[in-house]
Image (cartoon, helix red, strand yellow):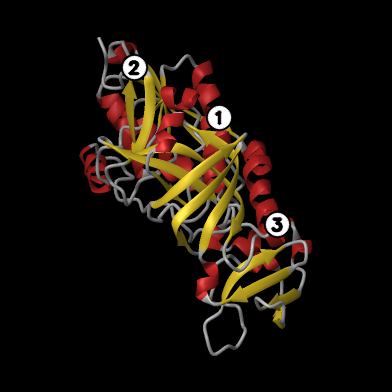
Amino acid sequence: MTNSLGIQKPEKETKVVVAMSGGVDSSVVAGLMKEQGYDVTGITLKLYDDSKTSKEGRQCCAGQDILDAKRVSEQLGIDHKILFYQKKFKEEVIDSFIDSYVAGETPIPCVQCNQTVKFRDLFKYAKDLKADALVTGHYVDRMQTNGKASMYRAKDTNRDQTYFLFSTTQEQLDYLRFPLGKIEKQETRNIASKLSLNVANKPDSQDICFVPNGDYSSVIKKFRPESFKPGDILDLSGKKLGEHEGIINYTIGQRKGIKISSTDPLYVVNIDADKNTILVGPKESLIIKNLYLRDLNVLGAEDEFKKNIFIKVRSTGKLLESKITFKNNEANVEIIDGETGISPGQACVFYSKDDFGDKLLGGGWISKTENKNLST
């Protein structure tokens, strides 16, 4: 027999590990698995020392979240374990985040977290426990055909998290399950209420877990105080317009906080870490037509890239029609209509459209961008 997870075992003989962050989504997934009769173990990751972070921010994987996950597990009557991954997280996520910002990029630590400690290390741990599947509360629609899994954007497109999971390998995807992919967020909260979970009305996490209240510069100042070096702010012709107090205070596309008087609005169009300069210009200077990607993860078959391909360059962004050319583990992406505010360090994620929806084909990290004014 095939159970609701597509595994050929009765539910009671199927061991699943549920990644429990302490939020409503993963708590509901644990509740659903228990309700359906699976042998459930909840795992919560301790990723960083949150003793000095603000209590006002809404973050994931903080101390309160670990306590909430433990309480939910006790209520459901499932085993619960805490894995202490602070060292791994510091080395592979926080340090990488800081390195990227200091290099003038715009990093996405949530992708790196999923790529490393969550899906690589937790995946291995679940395998070591002889679990049949690793189940998470991500809003991703997973479909399986002939024993091979594919990932699609979730039914609730406002909550879709495929962008953050582009680096998931085929081996991991075949093992992973995402029960929330076909429902709306409000339905998740309704299920939490029906199960009487104490997190039913808990707000969603908003901040990056190690960035209290979204203050990136405070994190970099803590670990790399030498990064705050003053430098020049230049226009497109190279003329000096003013000075900055450190490139880490700026991101591509930024308008506010430049502190340069001008009759027309100015935007940050390039950050040169080597020269320690900020380049500003009009909004049209932000239009990017070509991207160069590194460190690809390709899930789609070769023939799928010969059809209409779409990309996303930010998690909340729209799908952009594009053409992709591959060479080794790099790619060139031509955005048909162009897009603004794209920065090296961001993820570029590939999609195609078929009868089942928007299919994730993988993606890569942006190493360089080009527009008519400059190459970064």
The residue beneath circle 3 is: 103
Q: Quadrant of residue 54 in the image?
A: bottom right
Relative image position of residue 151 (x, y in whole percent): 38, 33
x and y percent of residue 28 in the render? 31, 37
Camera-side mark, 3 or 2: 2
Q: Horizontal and vertical percent for residue 277?
A: 72, 70
Disc number for residue 146: 2
Return the residue at label 1.
120
Q: Earlier in the sequence, mark 2 or mark 1?
A: 1
Image marks 2 and 1: residues in contact by CB distance under 8 Å: no
The image quadrant where one finds the C terminus is: bottom right
Q: Residue at x 62, y 40 (%)?
A: 89
Tag 3: amino acid? Ala
Measured as percent of width and height from the top left, residue 9 is found at 31, 10
Point out the tag, 3 or 1, that comes first from the N-terminus: 3
Question: How far apart are labels 2 and 1 at the CA level?
Answer: 24 Å
